[in-house]
Image (spheres, grey):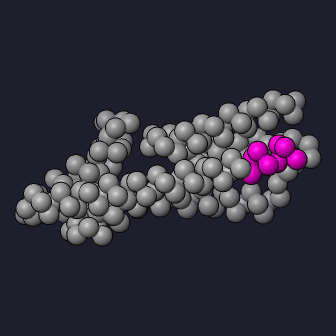
């Protein structure tokens, strides 16, 4: 039975790493489920404190992922119109054009919002590029965390 939990956990870890790159797949929660699968082996490799800390880290990064795109747009000069457009782009992109809408929705939304707000196209494009920067920063963070979780998984299996 332990082999089944290890293999299932490894599948979740791999899907989690892939999901860290793809915005429509909840990568970090999948990686965390991989740790939980491994916890069902005997003896359990992780302490309760370890699992709670990683659950909080995964939750915080899931929340920060959405905020980073908006923060990037704000950093590059987006106004309330651009931020509102970016938020609308995230929501509309998620529901109507997955998976590409999640990437391009905030960019197009920030650009459109700034144009509606009366900014020139070059300033609106700058705000949209900030949204891109925020998206890539959050993706890099997710990939790094997914790899750290994978490290703990592999270390626990090998020992």
Residue at 62 percent across and 61 percent down: it is 57
Q: Main secondary structure of the magenta part?
A: helix
Report whether residue 140 is seen.
yes
Report whether residue 26 is seen.
no
Residue at 9 percent across and 64 percent down: it is 119
Residues in magenta, as a range: 152-159
Of the 4 image quadrants, the one containing the N terminus is: top right
From the viewer's perspective, tell me whether residue 89 is left or right of residue 11: left
Q: Residue furthest right?
A: 43
Residue 41 found in image quarter: top right
Which of 23/156 is in front?
156
Q: Residue 75 location, x and y as percent?
A: 30, 70
- The mark tally for this picture is 0
Residue 124 found in image quarter: bottom left
From the viewer's perspective, tell me whether residue 63 is left or right of residue 133: right
Which of 112/121 is in front?
121
Image height of 36 relative to 52, above or below: above
- Does the magenta run of residues contain 153? yes
Q: Residue 18 location, x and y as percent?
A: 55, 39
Image height of 61 relative to 9, above or below: below
Q: Residue 77 location, x and y as percent?
A: 22, 69
- Does the magenta run of residues contain 70? no
Residue at 63 percent across and 61 percent down: it is 56
Which of 143/8 is in front?
143
Residue at 85 percent across and 50 percent down: it is 45
From the viewer's perspective, tell me whether residue 158 is left or right of residue 138: right
From the viewer's perspective, tell me whether residue 144 is left or right of residue 124: right
Q: Residue 121 location, x and y as percent?
A: 10, 57
């Amino acid at each position: 039975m332990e082999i089944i939990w290890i293999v299932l956990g490894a599948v979740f870890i791999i899907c989690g790493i892939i999901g860290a790159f793809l915005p429509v797949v909840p990568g970090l929660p999948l990686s965390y489920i991989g740790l939980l699968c491994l916890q069902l082996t005997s003896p359990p490799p992780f302490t309760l404190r370890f699992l709670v800390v990683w659950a909080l880290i995964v939750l915080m990064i899931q929340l920060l992922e959405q905020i980073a795109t908006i923060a990037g747009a704000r950093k590059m000069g987006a106004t309330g119109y651009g931020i509102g457009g970016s938020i609308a782009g995230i929501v509309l992109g998620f529901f109507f054009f997955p998976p590409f809408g999640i990437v391009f929705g905030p960019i197009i939304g920030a650009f459109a919002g700034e144009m509606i707000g009366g900014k020139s196209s070059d300033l609106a494009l700058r705000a949209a590029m900030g949204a891109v920067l925020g998206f890539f920063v959050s993706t890099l963070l997710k990939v790094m965390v997914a790899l750290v979780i994978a490290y703990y998984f592999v270390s626990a299996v090998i020992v």
